[in-house]
Amino acid sequence: MTPDDETLVRQCLDGDLAAFETLVERYEKKLFNVAFRMLNDLDAARDVTQTVLLKSYGKLKSFDARYKFYSWIYRIAINESINVLNERRRMEAVDERLLTAGMEPIEFTTSSELSEAIQEALMNLKEELRSVIILRHYLDCSYRAIGRVLDIPEKTVKSRLFSARQQLKDALSIHGILKT
Amino acid sequence: MTDPEFLESIHRELDGLNSEMESRKLHRRLESDAEALMLYRELDAMGRALSTLEEVEPPKALRRDVLNAIAAFAPGDAAGDEVSRPHTFRDSQSSGHGAPVLRYGWALAAGIVLGLFTAQLLPREASGIDGISGTMAPSSIPDTSQGLQQAGEWLLDGQGVAGAVRLAHDASRIEVAVDFSSPDPVYLVLTHDETVGVVGLSQDGTAVEIRESGAGHVVLGESGEHRYRVILSRTVAGPTTIDLGLFRNDELIDEYELYVGGPE
């Protein structure tokens, strides 16, 4: 049986590098996808994933075992992604035209095009809304878990999630993607 | 449709959180409220659309890079020491809203220059190299080069710069040590291919911050006598070449092509 996260963390703190390797195997793909959905950039997603894994190793001693490891590491991933977005904003003037481009109805013939359209709609959400959608719909986190990851009350999680869904629904409807 | 409780019930239903009774109650109301039914269907369709998002596979080298970086800097130690992210081009290769430029974030275009910059160096404007942006936390540098295979030594002697460049490596790590003495600040610029990545830098035995420039240049340098150690992690176990250039006032004063064989 594979050890749970808490056991692996303890083993890792005892100097067992193989235990950390198991944690990397367990979370690498999820972290990479979270970063990619937040950033829409494979290169940046790779860098963020690396940073998250190395930071989590480096800060493992400060990890509070009362909490779930996954909520801790997802929080680092979301925060790192937001750091990249902030940096990107500092480096680039936002071109408003980009934000409204592609809002005309489009016919999607492949799942890849559909994915791209959904990703584009995600990118048009505010980061605080995008992150709850990713945590709920990609990582399948409960409201409580999302609250722990983002360090916000459950009530705020619901409010953000409902707003995010509404906005996403509207954006996808405009694209003609939603078929009810 | 302004009833918050009803709205929450719709979302809870979509999240599979409603009890059987709550669910029945919701659907009874939906049957008599066309607007709410439309909203429910649209949100449900949106959830299904989100579930069609394809998972993206991380690059195969990512895990190896992370584990190499940890193994290189904390051999046998418990976790808890800061480990720097292997150098990549996140900061200098923004792909913006569009599709990713590179297939692998780690892949460095051959010939693009990697850089390191010590915080204690000259003011940036004096370096003549603009746009230094990427920053990595100081890494912990191994105390010794013990266990590394010595691969070569080159003497620096010219234009007021004296010292030596030493190259050592093993299966996972490459170390470039540069001792020099110069009356003026000297910048070192490293260039390498995608098979290695910079993971640490020390100046006179102290781990220092690593930076890179938007142009891809990397700088080290101070006047006086100093020792720099640059640690690179191999991502591929084959031979590679690292180009090292010494610059003073933007003028190339010496350059070296450091060939590093594969691990034996």
Image: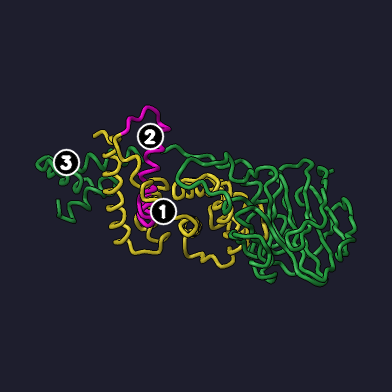
Chain colours: A yellow, B green
Query: For the residue carrying disc 2, how many other residues have a C-alpha within 10 Å: few (<14), some (14-19), or many (20+)?
Result: many
Q: Amino acid at mark 1?
A: Val
Picture quadrant where residue B32 is located: top left
**Label 2: chain?**
A
- Cα distance between the residues tagged 3 and 2: 25 Å
Give percent across and percent down for residue B54: 44, 37
Q: With B18 as the anchor, is B77 left or right in this view?
A: right
Residue B86, above or below A179: below
Q: What's the magenta region? A: A106-133
> In front: B161, or B260?
B161
Q: With A161 as the anchor, is B26 left or right in this view?
A: left
| Image quadrant occupied by the C terminus of chain B | top right
**Label 1: chain?**
A
Where residue A114 is drawn, which disc sits there?
A: 2
Residue labelled with disc 1? A94
Give percent across and percent down for residue B217: 67, 55
Residue labelled with disc 3? B37
Contact? badges 3 and 2 (CB < 8 Å): no
Q: Amino acid at mark 3?
A: Leu
Query: For the residue carrying disc 1, how many other residues have a C-alpha within 10 Å: few (<14), some (14-19), or many (20+)?
Result: few
Residue B120, above or below A119: below
Camera-side mark, 1 or 2 = 1
